Every structure is written in structure tokens, then in C-alpha cells.
Image (cartoon, grey):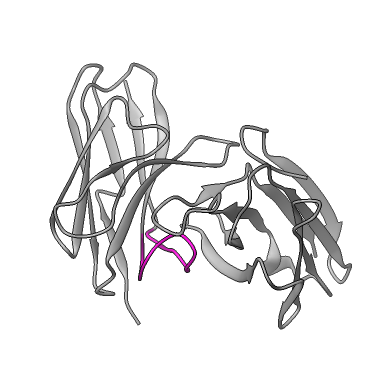
Amino acid sequence: GGIITQTPKFLIGQEGQKLTLKCQQNFNHDTMYWYRQDSGKGLRLIYYSITENDLQKGDLSEGYDASREKKSSFSLTVTSAQKNEMAVFLCASSILGSNERLFFGHGTKLSVL
Amino acid sequence: SQWGEENLQALSIQEGEDVTMNCSYKTYTTVVQWYRQKSGKGPAQLILIRSNEREKRSGRLRATLDTSSQSSSLSITGTLATDTAVYFCATDRGSALGRLHFGAGTQLIVIP
């Protein structure tokens, strides 16, 4: 078995601040994902990466940057936090692509003051 | 029924009852995946059903897929209070690489 670890669990930021969320997986999976979950809504794909140093934009990439410097890690940067923004960011990984099972971390809850 | 930008739906039932949740999708998919998310946790996959399958079972769970109507369902028999969670369906819109699209989800509350 493996695990996906997201840090931090809670992140409080100020408007306009650049914030970085980190994700590590020990499954040795090729593909990693960042999703955003707003209260009462489904998951929306921000970025994904099919291999080390690869980045692919999802449906919600504006306002975010991502980095996949190692196979096991995938980080997400909120380039300028929006006032009163509140969401959960979920990291996931899979062996190949989206027609296989995704394994998720527990999420990072972001609040912007 | 759930998809896309719709808001979360809620369903409340008594423990022991059976329940069926529906999902409709707009674009061809090679698979439909069903996930469950408990409070404070990330989603966990329950069942994956491929486009050439009509039904898949796993314990108390049964998923169906009707590609002609582009719809899928997840049934739970003999629900338990521990089945309380949000249930999502997800499709790949025909692309096997990278993009899994989630519906808005169904909040299921099972009352003991």
C-alpha cells in the first residue's frame, strides 16, 4: 500500500499572498493531480502531471502554478490569494491516467482573510 | 441525478434501507468511476465500470452503466450509518490520460 501526504492540512493566508501547497506520494505513480473542491460542489481539475517535469493545465488553472520536480512530489502555488476565498485542495495520483483508480490525500483547507 | 456544475444533492434515509444514486454525463467516456468522500477525508474509489460493462458489484454496492443514455447508477443495499458520505461519479470524457471529471455529488445521510 501507499499514502498521499498533503501539507499543510490548514493554510490561512492574506489577500494577494502567494501560497504553496505540497503533495508527496509513495505509490510510485506516474500521474499526479490537483483538484479544488468548493463547499457543496464537485471537484475541479487545476493541474495534472503525467510524469516528472510534465505539467498539463486543467479546467481551473488560471491563478495557479504547479511544479513536478520529482516523480513523488507535486506542488501547487496560488499566485495571488483572493479575499474571502475558502476551498479544499485535493492532491491525487494514479498509475497511468484517468481511466484508472485515483488515490487522494486528505486535502489542504485554504482560508484567505 | 448529478453532473458538472450542478449543486450538491442531499438524500436522507433510515439505516437498513436500500438507496440508488444516479449520474448522467454528456460526453463519451471509457470508464465511470464512483467515489465516496467522508467528512474531512479525500475521496476513495468504490467501483470502476468500463464502457463495455453493464454492471459491476462489490459487496453491498452495485454500479450500472448505460452508454446509450449516458447514465450510471450506484446502489447500496442494507445501508449502514457508516455509509453516510458524499458520493461522486467521475468520467474521463474519452481521454485516458489525466482528465477525470467529477459530478457535483450526492450527500447521503443514513440515520441509525
Q: Is residue A25 left or right of residue B84?
A: left
Q: Residue at x 56, y 47 (%)?
A: B102
The image shows residue A70, relative to residue B49, as above or below, that is above
Q: As drawn, is B68 to the left or to the right of B90?
A: right
- Magenta highlight: main SS: loop
What is the quadrant of residue B7 in the picture?
Answer: top right
Q: Quadrant of residue A87?
A: top left
| Image vertical order of residue B18 relative to residue B96, above or below | below
Q: Is residue B90 rendered to the left or right of residue B108?
A: left
Nearest the eye: B11 or B99: B99
Q: Nearer the viewer, residue B51 or A92?
A: B51
Residue A52 is left or right of residue A28, and the answer is left
The image quarter in which residue B29 lies: bottom right
Q: Looking at the image, is B83 positioned above or below residue B107?
A: below
Q: Foreground residue, A86 or A33?
A: A33
B106 is higher (above) or lower (below) than A28: above
Q: How many marks?
A: 0
Q: Is residue A49 magenta?
A: no
* Quadrant into which the C terminus of chain A falls: top left
Q: Position of residue A3 (x, y in %)?
A: 32, 71
Q: Position of residue B13 (x, y in %)?
A: 85, 57
Q: Residue at x 60, y 36 (%)?
A: A40
Location of residue A46 in the rendering, given as x and y in whole percent from the top left corner: 36, 39
Q: Nearer the viewer, residue B98 or B61?
A: B98
Task: Kindly identify the residue that appears in the image at 17 percent across and 27 percent down.
Answer: A18
Q: Residue furthest left?
A: A69
Is residue A95 one of those drawn in magenta?
yes
Which contiguous range is marked in magenta? A93-105
Q: Position of residue B21 (x, y in %)?
A: 78, 56
The residue located at (40%, 62%) in the rendering is: A97
User: Which image quadrant: the N terminus of chain A?
Assistant: bottom left
